[in-house]
Image (tube, coloured by chain):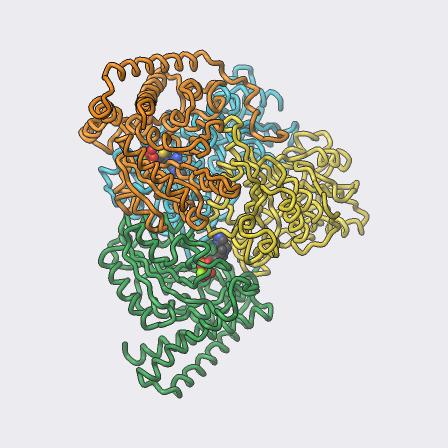
Chain colours: A green, B cyan, C yellow, D orange
């Protein structure tokens, strides 16, 4: 990885962090409605994995989708505008935080029903295989999503049909307030791959370089021989969504994890192992701060969708 | 009607490379109702895909493939199993487009065979068409004649919108004129299947056949019912119904499913709303008794709408 | 209303050892809507059971436990997820008894929170109550006041039949008199929540509150609507509706869900069928615009029924 | 196993075989409607497994339920009457072939939606555990049922909650016309247990003695430490249901399997290893023939349910 790529990854992680902080502030100001699920703590996952994809590779994830959207190349402007329900948002204000998407960068959404996007991923991969493309579909989901029927049906079908899907479990140890131990029969999500005879591995999601490498290997495996389950262990520093009482974990536990801040870990590596100067990184962070400020301004100043748009985009042909 | 549906599928598969079929037993077996018999050998395993027994990934993968530009025809062995794919149908097929501001197009067809009358027991004999018709974002089609089945299925496959295509298991034997080749019927257009003057019978799917029989019987007594076939439940085309009703001023709505919260309620409510001044008598509803269908033949038939029930209902509104 | 529901659950758990709660985040978290806050510490993990995210086994295991003699209260975090358990609800809870000739008793309560208005997007904002009400074998309850919520939930838990108990997320804050202790309301009985003489407003759940506001506003203009609360959608008790209608001769039906094939259609159809000679004007329906609910606040509110819509609809039928 | 028990097992397998042959004939005569799924070829499974249960152990299965019903102790009269839709049937003629049940012998049905009864089994086991009973729920299902979401959700929950369920997969190699290889990511169903860290084993379902022993061991394991997956390999000698074109398998394959007839194998063992005389077995078979004849007569002569029963048994309280 060359220097500029190294810095690009760092910038991306910081961008996601600042974007989420800005979103949290906008939510506190009552400018964002509905649910808001922050990606803070998990930045190395989307950044590392998606840095390894090719442009033709599709990406799809669940509702905790801001980081993935940014890593796919969606602008903070379009993300924040969607969070504010503006016409300039990725989904014209119809989807909100949980439903970001931009087909032009091959990001197929943000999906709010746990597990429901796994079959969609299988279907997209089927389409690529059907056409003889070598594209892979990268499907992100949480640890909690691995206990629902969708997971089983999609993983089984992907093996039976040898579909080019990289199944990526972001194991942040909890599904809302329920720990993996209380919801899953097996402690490591990767073990579930054994039930499908599916190759798999597990990687530390706080280290963006390890994530990136694991993703490169997994993507190669998928292109060579079909589905693969990549478990990435991580942690969300914030609550499940805004207003989570967090009775299910101690602040000690949270603090211990925060010492493994993926941005901090990578920053240390850059300065100590890649001889990047702290000054350069500070400068880069300052630029990111400005970019986010500008994006917030853009989102706030963007127009609301017109009332007539209520009936738009429901059917491709005719309306009712 | 079986041939008409087979033809529609065959012709669209031949016409458009993007069209493929997936479902349980659609391939090697040839379709549980023999609708896709011979398809597997002709089109091969890539386009005629046998799936595991897993309805939610059948419809879900179809949704995904449709988003990615293919035109899947997902077959649910029976509509009763659609409840195992309910989230994919009503939360995804129906909403993926609008929820993302129109970025996604989901040209999926979900074929589902429904209906009672074959002693399959309560879980395998339902006619829950109305449940799917309730959801904006879906189009719900349920043909009652072979040529409509062919024309509407071809239209459904060519439609860029998700279409729930509901067939009736006991209609497969129905014979009827089917023009060869390019038969296309517009989705969302009701049709007068029998002209008349004394009363309007509004119906669809299997009940169209029973309604036509009832009409013949009544015609013997000098009563000439006009029979309007909805063909599509969403979008619901009320114009032909209202035109007819404004002439007859009397109506009976006939459906196979349960009466409460059924199709007839909506149709009746709309007639009253849009043709109030033309109403000469309460609108009648003929529907299934409100019981899970029993296995026993006599009990099952007692619960299902019969020709005599339609005849009686028509006499009541006259 | 939150307290009323909590009280009902708490009291029934104290009263009957066989009662237990299972669902996502009902325990340690205390319920996503804090309905079961404190339950886990008091009743323990055996009776307040956090489950994996797996709606079909939540309802399915509840069905099985009920067959085996327990009285499970299965909580679906929102009614939108009921579509993932649809087969268990409509093919099993509803049919296990009759399909086996009455051998099984399935005293399960499925609590589901529904409704729009919180900017949760199309898949998380539905009011699909009518869909469940269509199935014989189920009882479907949807209270609109705190005391009804308490009395009906206690009755549902004591009922030997499967009950789908639908709460509205934006009603939890609603205040209202709740008698302590033994409050029991009969399932299947509609209720006049506001006496009047000029027009009958038929509604339930959240829309009861908006209808009462509309009634107050109209009362200021000298129009006195009578507001009838269905409270239960199946079995549907039309008597209080018909009694009222025979006096007012005019009606507006108000529901939060989509208009087509909604609750209002059935209620209107039955009024016409059973009180035809008393009808002085077309019955009005107020319901949700036929769109998947958008996230944007203004658009969402434009799609949902508002007090002004009810007022306007009442004026139209007068 | 004492002599009388040895003969009881033989008699039961023959009884199931003759019952199914009678059912096939009645179907041909048009006296049975709907679907009819025969158990012929699989008799050793229900006979062997259920002979190992205690009275308090619950049994539940799918729609291929005649053998299981007989093994649970339901009379051929009640089974055939149900197949004919008579008021004297197990389900008063409301359920038919796919919905046999008799709570008095702890048989909880016959269920026609593939996989849907697995959650019911989990729930019944939960009820027993909740009450502190040591009962186990025996849940039978087919190979095809292991690819549906229900299987995943139920097996995972049974491990997380340590429910006393014995999961029994009757692997007859096909789900309708789809072979295990074409529907399942793994060739042996038992491998799926690995995804749940669940103890498991695989046994030859054509040998009733091996089945019985495997069931005894599995039941002991469940009582000791929770769920267990027992895969029993078998084969249905007839089509999936009446009128199966059987395009998916060759008659050679069927004939090869028929040489492993579970009744023949056991008969050989009884005569060669347990010194039972062929004469005694023939006598026993003759008795069974008569029992089935009598049962058919009973079923045919039984009354149809009254029309009023249409509205009976839908609700426990009130009606609509
Ligand atoms: C089918 C379904 N059930 C329940 C929910 C409510 N819900 C939203 S997020 C969530 C937890 C998911 O946890 P996980 O998959 O680990 O993802 P994470 O939030 O940790 O990123 C739940 C239960 C839902 N959206 N969909
Ligand atoms: C959810 C569902 N999907 C499809 C069907 C139709 N169907 C009935 S039996 C069957 C095959 C089941 O195979 P398996 O589980 O191996 O049991 P077997 O018939 O071999 O005993 C199918 C697909 C059904 N009843 N339920
Ligand atoms: Mg998680
Ligand atoms: Mg099988």
Count of numbered labels shown in the rendering: 0
Q: Please state the horizontal and vertical placement of residue D139, each as a whole percent of the image.
A: 40, 37
Q: Where ligand 2 lies, by image quadrant? A: top left
Say left or right for C100 vs A123: right
Answer yes or no: is residue A120 visible: yes
| Figure quadrant of residue A4 | bottom left
Quarter of the image with the N terminus of chain B in it = top left
Above/below status of D209 relative to C86 = above
Q: Please state the horizontal and vertical placement of residue A194, each as a whole percent of the image.
A: 30, 53
Above/below status of B149 relative to B224 = below
- Tell me the residue at 31%/37% (across/down): D214
Say left or right for D26 vs B279: left
Q: Please state the horizontal and vertical placement of residue B273, each as a whole percent of the image.
A: 63, 39
Above/below status of B300 relative to C36 = above
Q: Please state the horizontal and vertical placement of residue B140, each as a whole percent of the image.
A: 46, 40
Quarter of the image with the C terminus of chain B in it = top right
Q: Residue furthest front?
A: D2
Nearer the observer, D31 or B60: D31
- Tell me the residue at 37%/49% (across/down): A152
| Figure quadrant of residue A230 | bottom left
| Figure quadrant of residue D231 | top left
Answer yes or no: is residue B23 visible: no
């Amino acid at each position: 990885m060359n220097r500029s790529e190294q810095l690009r990854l760092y910038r991306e992680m910081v961008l996601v962090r600042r974007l989420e902080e800005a979103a949290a502030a906008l939510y506190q100001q009552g400018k964002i409605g509905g649910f808001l699920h922050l990606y803070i703590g998990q930045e190395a996952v989307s950044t590392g994995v998606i840095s390894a994809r090719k442009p033709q590779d599709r990406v799809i994830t669940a509702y905790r989708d801001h980081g993935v959207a940014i890593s796919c190349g969606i602008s903070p402007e379009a993300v924040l505008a969607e969070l504010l329900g503006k016409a300039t948002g990725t989904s014209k204000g119809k989807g909100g935080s949980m439903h970001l998407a931009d087909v032009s960068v091959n990001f197929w959404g943000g999906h709010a029903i746990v597990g429901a996007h796994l079959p969609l991923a299988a279907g997209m991969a089927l389409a690529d295989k059907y056409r003889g493309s070598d594209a892979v579909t990268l499907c992100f989901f949480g640890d909690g999503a691995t206990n629902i029927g969708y997971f089983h049906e999609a993983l089984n079908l992907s093996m039976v049909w040898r579909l080019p899907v990289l199944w990526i479990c972001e194991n942040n140890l909890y599904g809302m307030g329920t720990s993996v131990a209380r919801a899953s029969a097996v402690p490591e999500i990767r073990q579930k791959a054994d039930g499908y005879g599916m190759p798999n591995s597990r990687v530390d999601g706080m280290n963006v370089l390890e994530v990136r490498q694991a993703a490169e290997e997994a993507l190669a495996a998928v292109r060579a021989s079909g589905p693969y389950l990549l478990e990435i262990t991580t942690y969300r520093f914030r609550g499940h969504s805004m207003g989570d009482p967090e009775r299910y974990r101690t602040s000690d536990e949270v603090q211990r994890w925060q010492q493994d801040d993926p941005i901090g870990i990578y920053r240390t590596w850059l300065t100590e192992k890649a001889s990047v100067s702290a000054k350069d990184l500070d400068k880069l962070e300052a630029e990111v701060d400005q970019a986010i400020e500008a994006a917030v301004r853009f989102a706030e100043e963007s127009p609301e969708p017109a009332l007539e748009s209520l009936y738009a985009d429901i059917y491709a042909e005719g309306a009712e | 009607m079986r041939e008409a549906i087979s033809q529609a599928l065959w012709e669209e598969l031949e016409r458009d490379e993007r069209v493929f079929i997936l479902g349980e037993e659609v391939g090697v077996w040839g379709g549980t109702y023999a609708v896709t018999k011979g398809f597997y050998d002709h089109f091969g395993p890539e386009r005629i895909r046998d799936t595991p027994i897993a309805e939610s990934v059948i419809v879900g993968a179809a949704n995904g493939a449709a988003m990615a530009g293919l035109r899947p025809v997902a077959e649910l062995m029976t509509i009763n199993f659609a409840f195992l794919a309910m989230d994919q149908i009503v939360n995804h097929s129906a909403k993926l487009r609008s929820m993302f501001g129109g970025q996604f197009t989901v040209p999926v067809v979900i074929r589902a065979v429904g209906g009672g009358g074959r002693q399959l027991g309560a879980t395998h004999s339902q006619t829950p068409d109305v449940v799917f018709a309730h959801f904006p974002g879906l189009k719900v089609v349920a043909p009652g004649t072979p040529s409509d089945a062919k024309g509407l299925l071809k239209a459904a496959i060519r439609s860029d919108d998700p279409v729930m295509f509901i067939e009736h298991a006991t209609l497969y034997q129905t014979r009827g004129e089917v023009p060869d080749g390019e038969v296309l019927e517009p989705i969302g257009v009701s049709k007068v299947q029998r002209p008349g003057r004394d009363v309007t019978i509004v119906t669809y799917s299997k009940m169209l056949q029973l309604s036509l029989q009832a009409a013949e019987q009544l015609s013997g007594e000098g009563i000439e019912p006009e029979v309007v076939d909805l063909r599509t439940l969403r979008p619901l085309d009320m114009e032909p119904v209202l035109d007819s009703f404004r002439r007859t001023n009397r109506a009976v709505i006939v459906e196979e499913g349960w009466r409460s919260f059924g199709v007839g309620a909506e149709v009746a409510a709309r007639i009253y709303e849009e043709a109030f001044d033309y109403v000469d008598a309460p609108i009648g509803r003929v529907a299934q008794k409100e019981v899970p269908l029993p296995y026993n033949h006599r009990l099952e038939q007692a619960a299902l709408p019969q020709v005599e029930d339609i005849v009686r209902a028509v006499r009541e509104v006259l």
